[in-house]
Amino acid sequence: MTTKSAAAAARATVYGYPRQGRDRELKKAIEGYWKGRVTADALRSTAAELRRTNWRQLAGAGVHEVPTGDFSYYDHVLDTTVMVGAIPARHREAVAADALDGYFAMARGTQDVAPLEMTKWFDTNYHYLVPELGPDTVFAADSAKQVAELAEALALGLTARPVLVGPVTYLLLAKPAPGVPADFDPLTLLDRLLPVYAEVLADLRAAGAEWVQLDEPALVQDRTPADLNAAARAYRDLSALTDRPKLLVASYFDRLGDALPVLAKAPVEGLALDFTGPAAANLEGLAAVGGLPGKRLVAGVVDGRNIWVNDLEKSLSVLGTLLGLADRVDVSASSSLLHVPLDAAAEKDVDPQILRWLSFAKQKTTEITTLAKGLARGTDAIAGELAANRAALASRANSPITRNPAVRARTGAVTDADARRSQPYAERAAAQRAHLGLPLLPTTTIGSFPQTGELRTARADLRAGRIDTAGYEERIRTEIQEVVSYQEKAGVDVLVHGEPERNDMVQYFAEQLDGYLATQHGWVQSYGTRYVRPPVLAGDISRPEPMTVRWTSYAQSLTAKPVKGMLTGPVTMLAWSFVRDDQPLGETARQVALALRDEVADLEAAGTSVIQVDEPALRETLPLRAADRPAYLAWATEAFRLATSGVRPDTQVHTHMCYAEFGDIVQAIDDLDADVISLEAARSHMQVARELAAHGYPREAGPGVWDIHSPRVPSAEEAADLLRTGLEAIPAERLWVNPDCGLKTRAWPETRASLENLVAAARTVREELSGS
């Protein structure tokens, strides 16, 4: 039963929604604009229609208050940079000349101007553009986007709530601009930034906003007293404004800890809190501070980051407890639904038994509105929904799909020795140098080469039956021949086969492993117009047969130079999938690691001397709270070693990481015991090389000298300069030369030019080192 006041208060809402559209219309329109095939007006029209579609879907499902401002052409943090006028000096001219082109220049760069640095949004696989700030930064309000999108929603007759990145999180995410001392603290700019937020809030109030949401997810991380004092001051000052809407401060992804009493005491009208996963501790924390008397609470009880059906009865129990802790309780997902696909109903090829376990953005919206209805009217009002939910949960718990006794027996038999190489690194390194015979500063790439339209067409033709398997494989062979031949002519030392047969570095393997489920329409934004389809870990994992040996061996048959075998590591296989929530992550990681161990053994047996097991998500998956990190890193590094430690000493094991803050995990990188690691470094100006040196990292490393997420072609001298900077931290005998990441998203013309400049840079610096 619920009270009459609860019935009046319980409403459904969300913090954000997938941006791309049912058929990724936004991606197609933006990329068409970049190529000159779509006009700016047409792009804006497509975007406006997608926003209207989203709002109508939400309202039609029973959402009482739709979000605005969460839609973005590229990234919502970049949108905030525009909103507060923090345009980097190098981009101001472009922004002044054309706001849209300048916006994309900040995101992607141009041939002459570097883009903003890009890194992971907390512990998700979404990437944001890092604000660049300094003591001379001058902020200026530009609320045009936020006001216009609010007006669009209100014109549809909807109740709408603008959603903005909060001022404290914005500053905590920022970095010192180029040329600014590294110890500059962007948070010192808070008093300069708050008047800009005040102006934006006044503009939104004038445009009809009753509430504005300010997202402060940075407060779920370990924060200093100075950080917490800044948050208290920010919301004291913003709350004191006379011309403003009501303020809803939101936080998500983890428990708030010491920040919870700060926000609870802030004179704002409401809080939006996560109550899923580790953030379930927010319930106890909220009770400990006496709740939120007189305030609105938006309760995130539906997981906004995973795709399993919600346990409605469990969520109702949490909501019932919360009713006594706030004046009004509304229901939401734990975070923006940006992090899940749009609609599970579009998956026509999924086993119907499994489909009933899945909940994408549309289904989560229904769960939220069902919970709001149950909270307001009582469980009798949703009896049918509760019965169907119980049946779906029982179906999953009891299904043989989820458990494989042979897999569980194998993981249970793993010993510590299975996760250790047979010889220490120094002995392995000597054996590998003798075996491989590589020059000083060896050059290589990360793995993938451009995925051309012809390759994508060939895959589509195979799926549609327009070509047979033989015809498709002939196209793959031709592509591998061209990639290998090009690398030999360019002078690359350690080659790759280019991965033309792979659709995605996780999905490709998931489709060949038992226990995984692939979707057809489960697209999720990674960054900009880059969308991925994370596979689903539905059951225990095993490898029925070799996955990569055939094409790697074929490439090796074309050259005398070493060709790397390319695999995706166990942590990344989890991080870029939708993982199980019915067993510990470490157990799932061990299952994946053993499947990969079999693949590594088969590659080595087939004559592959260099095997790269990529772990770009190792830092991304790092828990947001320091107290939770040792346990995670223990199983994560063990899983990598379990996958790679069965090889001979003269087989060289590589790994790769990109677009993350590596300083937090240098010890973990060391603990992987890989022989060579390649890392993103171009946008951060070799920062990771200095971090490795400060740690005393003893193995070989390739900090990237080519930013592949920008279309610009770095000159040979620019790459050589980065190499020289890298040599200040890493000895030449341990330094590799490579791009930041794979080349899948790049076009062939820029790939050829950039790779040839990279090889030329390595040659130049080798000559300098030899004195010739």
Image (tube, rainbow, N blue to C red):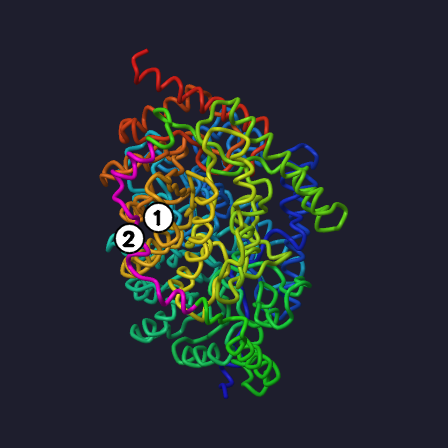
Residue at the location (31% across, 32% down)?
Answer: 180
* Occupied quadrant, residue 38: top right
Is the residue 534 above or below the residue 650 in the image?
A: below
**Nearer the observer, 563 or 314:** 563
* Residue 702 at x, y percent in the picture: 37, 34
2 and 1 marks in contact (CB < 8 Å): yes
Mark 2 vs mark 1, CA separation in Å? 9 Å
Q: Which mark is residue 227?
A: 2
Disc 1 secondary structure class: helix
| Residue type highlighted by circle 1 | Leu
Q: Nearer the viewer, residue 583 or 437?
A: 437
Q: Which residues are magenta?
A: 408-433
Q: Which mark is residue 172?
A: 1
On the picture, is 245 further left or further right than 21?
left
Q: Position of residue 581 (x, y in %)?
A: 45, 68
Amino acid type at mark 2: Asp
At horizontal 32% and vertical 65% (from top left) the residue drawn is: 260
